[in-house]
Amino acid sequence: MLAVNHLSHSFRNGTEDTPVLNQIHFDVGKGEMVALLGSSGSGKSTLLNLMAGLMKPTTGSILINGSAIEKMNENQLAEFRRSHIGFIFQSYELITHLTVRENVELPLVFQGMKPKLRREKAMSLLTKVGLGEKTEMFPSQLSGGQQQRVSIARSLVTMPTIVFADEPTGNLDTKTEKEIIDLLIELNETLGLTFVIVTHELEVARRTQRVIQLRDGYLVEDGAWAGEDE
Ligand SMILES: Nc1ncnc2c1ncn2[C@@H]1O[C@H](COP(=O)(O)OP(=O)(O)OP(=O)(O)O)[C@@H](O)[C@H]1O
């Protein structure tokens, strides 16, 4: 499903290379739900951006369903991301002048799907995430938790191979955070979707099956959640 092979990444500051990830190596199987945990600056976002094909690694490779994404050119990658990768952002990234339903339909518009079918798919997912009554509203008319539900529905509407989430509960209060985690777990269990969730919220890590911890660019733990400390 996902294989991260001896991945290292450095950023160039002027003439100096600053290593941010060092020899990161792990696999994620189909249907797994993994939390990627680490304190600020540990390299979580960089790793997520590499896995989602938003950046190319300095060395190492990332295989999704057996395809090495770092070897793809721009067009191949865009096409691959459209059909295989879902992404949930901390700040939702919804399009304000489109309705909730239109936002969820958008990835299917890019796939060239016919309006009737994409509308049905969007409505069905919006019902699943508890927004069946809000489909014709605009994002600004919804709460933060509801906007994140729209973003989740949008990330799943293409039935991607893997869904990456970047601090999906980072802007939410504790109660809403719990509801969003419950929803992600339910979607993982009922649809067999594979999730990698970047977080520094221990509550998220406590609830997933597996936690991968980064510290200063190194993978320091990989297994079931075992403690209170980061
Ligand atoms: N474009 C860049 N150029 C130079 N250095 C960068 C760049 N992006 C990130 N870094 C550095 O890489 C390191 C890891 O950053 P990253 O954003 O991956 O960490 P993080 O664990 O996601 O942190 P946070 O939880 O605060 O988002 C940091 O030291 C950061 O300063």
Image (cartoon, rainbow, N blue to C red):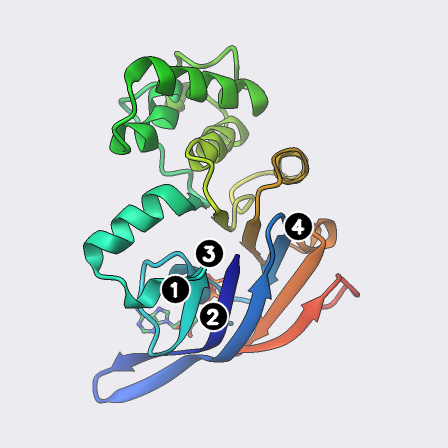
Residue 151: x percent and y percent? 44, 34
Instruction: Give the residue drawn at x 35%, y 62%.
Output: 69
Q: Nearer the viewer, mark 2 or mark 1?
A: 1
Task: Compare marks 2 and 1 and give the one earlier in the sequence.
Answer: 2
Q: Is residue 179 left or right of residue 114?
A: right
> Above or below — where is 17 with respect to 100?
below
Q: Amino acid at mark 3?
A: Asn
- Which numbered circle lies on residue 65? 3
Task: Compare marks 4 and 2 and give the one earlier in the sequence.
Answer: 2
The residue to which callout 1 is attached is: 50
Q: Are marks 4 and 2 in contact (CB under 8 Å)?
A: no
Residue 210: x percent and y percent? 69, 59
Q: CA distance from mark 2 to mark 1?
A: 11 Å
Q: Nearer the viewer, mark 4 or mark 1?
A: 1
The residue to which callout 2 is attached is: 43
Q: CA distance from mark 1 to mark 3?
A: 16 Å
Q: Amino acid at mark 2?
A: Gly
The residue to which callout 4 is attached is: 204
Which element carries disc 1, helix, strand or loop?
helix
Circle 2 residues within 10 Å: few <14, some 14–19, many ≥20:
many
